[in-house]
Amino acid sequence: MVYFSGLLQWNVKKICFEYDTDPYYQALDMKVKNYVSSAGIEVFSPVSHTLFNPADIIQKDEMDRRIRELTIELNNDRQ
């Protein structure tokens, strides 16, 4: 790939790009991160274009879902 060979040729030490929330682009970003990291290039990819980190919301939702399930189980056991 032209871009990757250019990174090495230009002696790039660090690349930066915004964290993407779309699953397709997350997979693409992961490929880029893996490739450039294996070449010794540092990657900086912060959550910067949203007001929150979607991964945090998903994790909290999973915890809330489990709490709701346990509450329902406890209520059913009491009846």
Image (tube, rainbow, N blue to C red):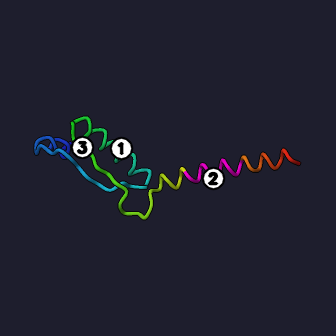
Which residue does the numbered mark 3 point to in the structure image?
42
* Mark 1 / mark 2, whichever is N-terminal: 1
- The residue depicted at 36 percent of the width and 54 percent of the height is 19
Q: Kindly report the distance in space between the C-alpha atoms of the residues bearing marks 1 and 2.
A: 28 Å
Identity, as a three-letter code, of the amino acid under mark 1: Met
| Circle 2 residues within 10 Å: few <14, some 14–19, many ≥20 | few
- Place of residue 77 in the rendered image (x, y in percent of width and height, measured from the top left): 84, 44
Q: How far apart are marks 3 and 1 (CA)?
A: 13 Å
Q: Mark 3 near mark 1, Cβ–Cβ under 8 Å?
A: no
Q: What element carries label 3?
A: strand
Q: Are marks 2 and 3 in contact (CB under 8 Å)?
A: no
Q: Mark 2 points at which residue?
A: 64
Query: Which sits in the foreground, 74 or 36?
Result: 74
Q: Which of marks 3 and 1 is in front?
A: 3
Chain part drawn in magenta: 60-69
Instruction: Inspect the magenta stretch and tell me whether residue 61 lies in it.
Output: yes
Q: Mark 1 points at which residue?
A: 30
- Helix, strand or loop for disc 2: helix
Magenta: predominant secondary structure element?
A: helix
> Which three-letter amino acid code belongs to the residue tagged 2?
Asp
**Foreground label between 1 and 2:** 2
**Mark sitting on residue 48:** none
